[in-house]
Image: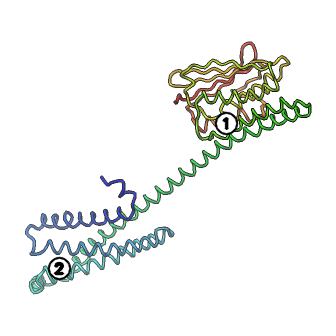
Amino acid sequence: MIPNRIMKDPRKLFWLLHLGGWGFWCVFLKYLYTTQILGEQPPYYFVYVVVISIIGMVITLGLRYLYRAVIERAVWLQAVAFLVGTSVAGFLWMQARSMIFMNFIEVEKDYDAWMEKMGAAAELYQSVSYISTFTSGWTVMAAWSVLYFGIKYHRIFQRVSESALKSAAMAHEAQLKMLRYQLNPHFLFNTLNAISTLVLERETELANRMVNKLSRFLRFSLDNDPMQKVSLAEEMEAIGLYLDIEKVRFEERLQLLEDIEPEARRALIPSLLLQPLVENAIKYGIAQREEGGSLSISARVFGGELLLELADDGPGAEIENNAIPGACGVGLRNTRERLWELYGDRHGFRLGQADPHGLTISIRIPYET
């Protein structure tokens, strides 16, 4: 098993595979295999195999620099470099092997005598031997080149895959932040309008209280990264800050009912997930009734999932295919999209009618603490 530190270092990985590959060819594919086939070997044959292996290593280093020059060029240029490079390398290696073998391993006079005995077949033998030696050398060079390109392309594919994953993660993060921050200006616009009305009506004390509560809510919003999750207890604290602002307008006409299990309070949910839903319930439900109304939030843990339910006792709305026809607000849509971006098909989001009237929103997400 190759250590991880070497796998991450291209230079160390190359030398490990380069030396290991040639060492394997030298000992197993050349020396031991030839010994097994031919039996007894000439003196110093192992030294000869080591020497030609070292020459092959040097020649393939030249191929490495050639391939590095064309690896990011057109495919046809890489193919030409492969064919020309392996052919030249195979020829050079064959010449070096033949010269060393004839001068240091084979006795030249014995070889000449043997060729003379063969007579007319000698020329044919020499041709076949030449082609066989060249083919053998070219095959080794081609195998080395195929492995080199294979590993190079594998590493390039890994880099492209990592880059694509990083880009997807960045796009995912940007999408979530856009969905989250799209909500704040909508809420801010409504609140500033309310403060402006209070100022015009000379309700300075109420206007001041509302500005203070708004600053606390915005501080909470800015301190929480949209990519991070918060506990349901922290989310309910943010909802409390938001409702404190709205109660300046609605006073006793707005009531909040909580039914949250202790285990559910520890659950992690996307930051400010419920605020736009509460805002919608007040705007389209409670604000439509002269006597105001109530808003209930319940949460429990069941089967490894967190079940959230938000209901108001407003006039309600027509529901078709789990959506409100003609609804143009961003709250419901953005909440759906945030949940999908974060949980995929591991979540549920359902609209329903409250009893006796009103709208119910049920959310199901994995239970995390």
Q: What is the spatial separation of the Cα atoms under label 2 and label 1, in whole angstroms?
A: 82 Å
Q: Residue at x 64, y 42 (%)?
A: 176
For the residue pair 235 and 201, the one nearer the viewer reads as 201
Relative to the observer, which residue lies in front, 213 or 121?
Answer: 213
Secondary structure under badge 1? Answer: helix
Name the image quarter holding residue 290. Answer: top right
Tag 1 or tag 2, which sits nearer the N-term? 2
Q: Is residue 309 left or right of residue 194?
A: left
Q: In the image, is residue 45 above or below residue 287?
A: below
Determine the residue located farthest toward the front in the rendered image.
Answer: 205
Kindly give the residue lying farthest to the right in the view shown: 201
Q: Which residue bears the numbered disc 2? A: 101
| Mark 2 crowdedness (10 Å alpha carbons): few <14, some 14-19, many ≥20 | some
In the image, which disc is placed on residue 337? none
Residue topped by disc 1: 220
Question: Which amino acid is tagged 2?
Answer: Phe
Residue 15 place in picture, x, y as percent: 32, 65
Which residue does the image show at 77% across and 31% down from the upper left?
Answer: 327
Q: Residue 73 placed where, x, y %? A: 50, 70
Q: Please rate how many residues cluster around mark 1, counting C-alpha atoms within 10 Å: few if below 14, some from 14 to 19, many from 20.
A: some
Front-most of residues 290 and 323: 290
Tell me the residue at 65%/43% (across/down): 177
Question: Would you identify the image quadrant in which residue 88 lies?
Answer: bottom left
Q: Which amino acid lies under the numbered mark 1 shown in the image of this protein? A: Phe
Residue at the spot x=78%, y=18% of the render?
Answer: 293
Q: Indicate the position of residue 243 as horizontal and vertical percent values.
A: 74, 26
Horizontal side of residue 107 vs 78, given as left or right: left
**Residue 105: percent from the left, percent from the top?**
13, 79
Residue 68, placed above or below residue 110 = above
Q: Residues at badges 2 and 1 in contact (C-beta under 8 Å)?
A: no
Which is more toward the observer, 235 or 114? 235
Quarter of the image for residue 222 reads: top right
